[in-house]
Amino acid sequence: MSVRKDHTTACGLDFGTSNSALALPDGDSVKLAVLEDTATSIPSAIFFATEHPPELFYGRAAVREYLDGTPGRLMRSLKSILGSSLMNESAAIGETDYKYVDIITAYLRMLRKRAAAGAGDALDAVVLGRPVRFVDDDAKQDRAAQETLAGCARAAGFQHVEFQFEPIAAAFDYERTVTHEESVLVIDVGGGTADFSVIRLGPGRRNHVERTGDVLANDGIHIAGTDFDSRLHMAWVMPSLGYRAVGTQGRVVPSLVYFDLSTWHRINLLYAPRFVSALRELRAFFTDPRPYRRLVHVIDQRLGHDLLGRTEAAKIELSRVADTKFDLGAIEAGLAVRATRTQLIDLLGGLLARLVEVATSTVKAAGLETTDVSTLYFTGGSCGMTALRDAFARAYPHSRVVLGDLFGSVVSGLGIEAGRRFGVG
């Protein structure tokens, strides 16, 4: 890898499914850019206020506008669009159709502008983080997803765009703390993907620009936080709206609407006018009118993101407590759901086992046995789940467990990489 000395305004950018952050090389370290108020991370969310004149809100401000009932449309988990069937489609917002790639571009432009304001200079070069796989088992679609993201970054004002795998970036951040040679399995489970890298780290390696020989294996899979949210939401909340209800003539209510209500980037599809007639047709499947009334209320009042957010909050809380209760009074007065850690483990057990399986296959691809892994390094917001870390700890009983900065390791590593690649700092 050659060092490019012609750019001094480089950065590392972690465009995440749930949250995003940007890091600037700063000598031998990095500095995280302030992106919203005093925060160095910002939710990957945009709210299109459809009042006149139309206005865009980003991050926490976007979520606040949505929860305050401002007329408009909230879009979250923007990264999930990359590699999906929505990548080349448009979203109807008010009387205007917006291409999804233009929405991503607007979000990246906002990140660049806010970070540049703090840096006092325009940012023209970026190392973008990417999952090991945008798309499972489809190399062509995976390349298309990266090319689309690169195009969005250029349209946002970055003249020079390069990429680094997110778990490798996290490893580079962790390497700043190591005092001896380690064989590390990086476990990066965020909102949209789980990524695994096996890499050799050490104080004698950290200043090398070329690190290809230290990376022993990479792999990834599309199982992560949003999938956990979806599975829990389908089990905890959707039955109140009629999911799996048996209606007239023994017919089960069609499940697609519940799947869409449980998938962050698909919720907005249900608010399109064309879905109204389809919702009316579902009425014939219900013998009990109450779940149907609740379902209609959720769609009419656009409560999908709020409800899924409650499930996400319950998921997070169950790493701290054994059981919790969350309020669904926005659907119907007095309605609530009780969730337990035992339920969470049962519901997510298969997904967690699959993550361990892919990680262990990555270790094997590196030519190592599980006993050769000295350290399990966890990063990404979903690694905050004790159930996830426990699943790996059981499979790697001889490895040291290190919990990194769940929301900062990847972006810090990307900032380090930006300094190396563009000769900054």
Image: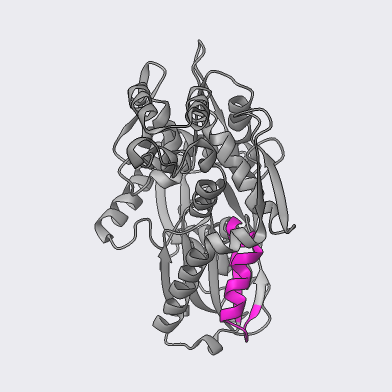
Q: Residue furthest front?
A: 249
Q: Residue furthest top?
A: 52
Q: Is residue 377 highlighted in magenta?
A: yes
Tell me what residue is drawn at x 54 percent, y 89 percent. Answer: 372
Q: Nearer the viewer, residue 43 or 293?
A: 293
Above or below, 256 against 24 in this view is above
Q: Is residue 105 highlighted in magenta?
A: no
Q: Position of residue 335 (x, y in %)?
A: 65, 35
Q: Which of the 4 image quarters holds residue 151?
A: top left
Count how many numbered circles sit on residues in the image.
0
Apparent side of residue 376 relative to residue 421 in the rendered image (left or right): right
Q: Magenta region: which residues?
A: 375-400
How does the figure colour the protein chain or chains?
Answer: one colour
Asked if one can make out residue 121 in the rendered structure from this viewpoint, the answer is no
Apparent side of residue 95 relative to residue 346 in the rendered image (left or right): left
Q: Position of residue 355 (x, y in %)?
A: 48, 68
Above or below, 35 against 324 in this view is above
Q: Which of the 4 image quarters holds residue 244?
A: top left
Apparent side of residue 315 relative to residue 365 in the rendered image (left or right): right
Q: Position of residue 287 (x, y in %)?
A: 43, 32
Q: Pick the quarter of the image with the C terminus.
A: bottom right
Q: Residue furthest left?
A: 140
Q: Position of residue 410 (x, y in %)?
A: 56, 59
Above or below, 22 against 37 in this view is below
Asked if one can make out residue 112 in the rendered structure from this viewpoint, the answer is yes
Tell me what residue is drawn at x 42 percent, y 87 percent. Answer: 367
Q: Nearer the viewer, residue 419 or 233?
A: 233
Q: Which of the 4 image quarters holds residue 119?
A: top right
Q: Pick the quarter of the image with the N terminus.
A: bottom left
